[in-house]
Amino acid sequence: MQIRHLQRVLAPEPAPRDTPGGHPLRSIVRRLARVEREGSRVTVIASATTVRDGLRREELTLGSPARGEFRAVLLSPEHARPGPGVLVLGGKNARLEQLTGEAAPDHPDRNTAERLARAGLTTLAFDHGVLGGVPSERLGGRDEGAVLAHAFTLTGRCLLGALVGDALGVLAVLRAHPLVDGERVGLLGHSMGAAVALHTALLAERPLPVCAASHLGTYPALFGRLFTGFEGAVLPGILEYADLPDLYAALAPAPLQLQYGTDDPFLDPADTRAAAETVRRGYRTAGVPEPEVLELPMGHGTHVAHAARFLTRALAAPAADPAPVPAQRIRFDATERRAVLDRVDTALASGVLTQGPLVARFEELAGDWTGTAGVAVSSGSAALEIALRILDVAGGTVLMPVNTFFATAAAAVRAGARVRFVDIEPEGLGMDPAALRAALDREPGARAVVPVHIGGIVPPSLDEVLALCAERGVPVLEDAAHAFGSTLRGRPAGSLGRFGAFSFFPTKVALSGEGGLVTGAAPEDLEAVRRWRDHGKSAAGSTLHDRPGGNWRLSELHAAVGTVDLERFAATLAARRALARRYDALLDGVPGLRPHPVPGESGSNYYKYLAHLDESVDREVLKKRLRDRHGVHLAGEVYDHLLCDQPYFGAAAGPDGDFPRARRFARHHIALPLFPSLTEEEQERVVSALRGELS
Ligand SMILES: *Cc1c(COP(=O)(O)O)cnc(C)c1O
């Protein structure tokens, strides 16, 4: 009985370690479930086999340190050869004899293990031990499962975790069975058993197909509105991180079938439908086939025929294809997420929700990487616009490279300027000094020059650009949105011009969700940024406004994310650089493409890992094939359209030429996926996919 488990667990144990690379929710589930590895090790103590009525029936006595001895039954077709196996997890009130068809089922389709075996699958079902441990006279009408769940809570553990521990142990027995191909096992669960199946699959080492019946909805509905939730089917504290549909979605890419009945008195069909949609969306986001969701005219049951069809198909093919390599993956581990939540909590408790101590800390942390002090603002675009307004570009001209993000130019337009575009130089992808000189000759009254550090490279040519601008008396604003942490001959991006502008949008190398930073060496410039970002107040706290400022402030809540991200930035940068070096080595000898060599003086943060394609390669076709045939998603280009070709600027581009070098680069480069959590295996898949398609 699970009661014995409870007695044992009063002795503390070290927490099991995380498996690297899994969905972030898995580490949460592992922590909250507190499954004990040692306690869950299950051995076969005795077995006896009979054949009856076309089924081979193996009665097993299993034992584990947590549970002691308990019963299980393995069923297979009489003449079965090694094949797929399914662990069958019954509901709270399901007895083993009913699951296996020895006793008449007292609930629709309760004999699931028997019927799946008749459909050709080897099944293993075991006694979950939730009921029958306490004499009924002592229960006095109370639900035994609830009593047991509460008793577990007293020890800081949970009944669901104990059930999952058993299931993981029994799963290993199933895998090792001579009639089972250990690579092809799946889970079927009903009600509480579906919760066990879900959490077991989340903690399993590789994706397992799961069929979950009559257990779908949101926890707030099940526990707060319907009052039908069972505490033995939920991890205490889980809602702090995820709702039930999020947990199902975290099973991606494992094949998943969700069944629910429209007449199930424990579920609310509308809530269940919405939950199913959340799961579907999660699978879509992960870029894998959607789960099968079956809304059926049944009560609180299992549709065994649908389950058998699904499991037979899911377990037929050898292991599923590996998950796709995404263009980008943002990851905060459990400790980092906890740190963000703690900071948000502190902000909420203090009532200071914007421009408070977290924003100050964010500015301080950013300063370690930008060389000069900075003022946090609401976005990279706001940073650019504020700097341009301080430079008083209204009515004048601003010069910038023709291959930058639209936001660079739009900020200048909003600040009242006319923009003129300049071609790039091919080595550092910066503004071409000769082209800039010609543009300055054409625009003698230019109010600002905005170089952009494309892909994280601060180009050596920037020194010439700076000298030229100094000579002409034109201030320089670095659009360093790509270049947080990058350097040129040891000098940080953002410290080279009069102003630097950074973005902390989620796709950038450092992020706060939404956020930006203006850097500058002159204290009066930074003070002006503070005035502009706060509605143009003439002084802090004043109600007098002396310029048309805006709401360009950063909130404390964004700074909570941003500070946590900046605290790990040294590791982020080191990881990006190591991955880039590894791509350099792996791509050596791949035909049809040439990695862009980063100039030796430039310390790139590898915002983008850029490569040039041979002119004969059709980039769109290549990207589609990488996606469709290899599950490899390339990152976005920087950029595929020149600004002069954007609908907004098309007509206004002026007589600036046709930008041959920028055009050539825009047309023929790609950016490989590169983010700190990219694994070596994923990198190898990217490169072998490229090699396969380009050879
Ligand atoms: C991202 C980006 C911006 C804009 O930053 P937001 O934070 O999205 O406003 C500006 N310039 C460049 C080059 C960028 O990549």
Image: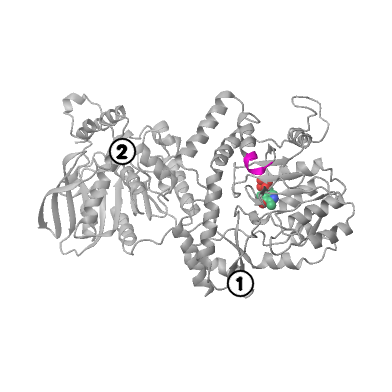
- Left/right placement of residue 371 relative to residue 195 reads right
Residues under labels 2 and 1: Cα distance? 53 Å
Q: How is the image coloured?
A: one colour
Q: Is residue 367 magenta?
A: yes
Q: Secondary structure at mark 2?
A: helix
Q: Position of residue 136 (x, y in %)?
A: 17, 28
Q: Quadrant of residue 539?
A: top right
Above or below, comparing residue 353 to residue 289 in the picture = above
Q: Is residue 235 left or right of 10 when viewed as pictured? A: right
Taking the image as shown, residue 71 lies to the left or right of residue 35, namely left
Note whether residue 312 is visible. Answer: yes
In this rendering, the count of numbered labels is: 2
Q: Is residue 165 above or below residue 55?
A: above
| Residue 93 left/right relative to 325 | left
Task: Say if residue 217 shows up in the picture.
Answer: no
Whichever of labels 2 and 1 marks the residue nearer the N terminus, that label is: 2
Mark 2, residues whose alpha carbon is within 10 Å: few (<14), some, or many (≥20)? many
Asked whether 571 or 28 is in front, the reply is 571
605 vs 657, nearest the viewer: 605
Callout 1: SS: loop
Q: Quadrant of the N terminus?
A: top left
Prevailing secondary structure class for the magenta stretch in the rendered image: helix
- Name the residue at 24% across, 39% down: 93
In the picture of the structure, the residue carrying the numbered disc 1 is: 618
Quarter where residue 570 is shown: top right
When the figure is inspected, residue 300 is found, relative to residue 124, above or below; the finding is: above
Residue 552 marker: none
Q: Amino acid at mark 1?
A: Asp
Residue 530, position as x, y percentages in the image: 74, 33
Residue topped by disc 2: 160
Amino acid on which disc 2 is placed? Leu
In the image, which residues are magenta? Answer: 366-371
